[in-house]
Image (cartoon, grey):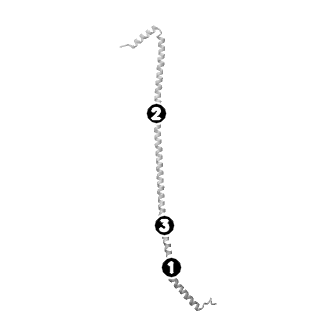
Amino acid sequence: MELIKPSFGLIFWMLIGFGILFFILAKFAWPVITKGIASRNQKIQDQLDEAAKVHAELENLNVKHEQMLAEAKAERDSILNEARAISANMKEEAKVAADKEAQTIIEDAKKAIHFEKMKAMTDVKNEIANLSIEIAEKVMKEELSDKEKQEALIQKWVKDCNLN
């Protein structure tokens, strides 16, 4: 029963022991403990401040990233539109050049056809003239085979020439 109801002496020595322990702890341990806790609180606060700063910088970087992404998209769209315009312009220029070349080829072909036609006409006229001369020669040989016919023909030509 002594443990349930401690005696006065036991309580006295327990209080003195507790007081000495409290004094030693208060004198030597608590300042170190409180200093460690304060240091730890300061480190935690510094880390929280640093985390907040990093978070703010991250937000700033995200905003800059979004801006750069938007600028890149706008530049990409601009480049694509410019490329489309250049492509359309090149197609149009190629079409115009092809039309001009086709027109030149057509004109050259028309000129060549005209020259070939004129050459053919000249060849036909020359052939007709040669045939006419050959026919005239044959007719003349036939008619001039006789001396009387020759003299009559010469007289006729002289009358037709009628020299003034």
* SS class, disc 1: helix
| Residue marked by disc 1 | 32
The residue depicted at 47 percent of the width and 19 percent of the height is 130
With 137 as the anchor, is 1 left or right in this view? right
**Residue 146 percent location from the top left of the image:** 47, 8
Q: Amino acid at mark 1?
A: Val
Q: Quadrant of residue 150?
A: top left
**3 and 1 marks in contact (CB < 8 Å):** no
The CA distance from mark 3 to mark 2 is 78 Å
Q: Amino acid at mark 2?
A: Asp
The CA distance from mark 3 to mark 1 is 32 Å
| Residue marked by disc 3 | 54
* SS class, disc 2: helix
Task: Say if 9 sits above or below 160 in the image.
Answer: below
Task: Say if 67 sits above or below 28 in the image.
Answer: above
**In which quadrant will I find the N terminus?**
bottom right
- Mark number, residue 77: none
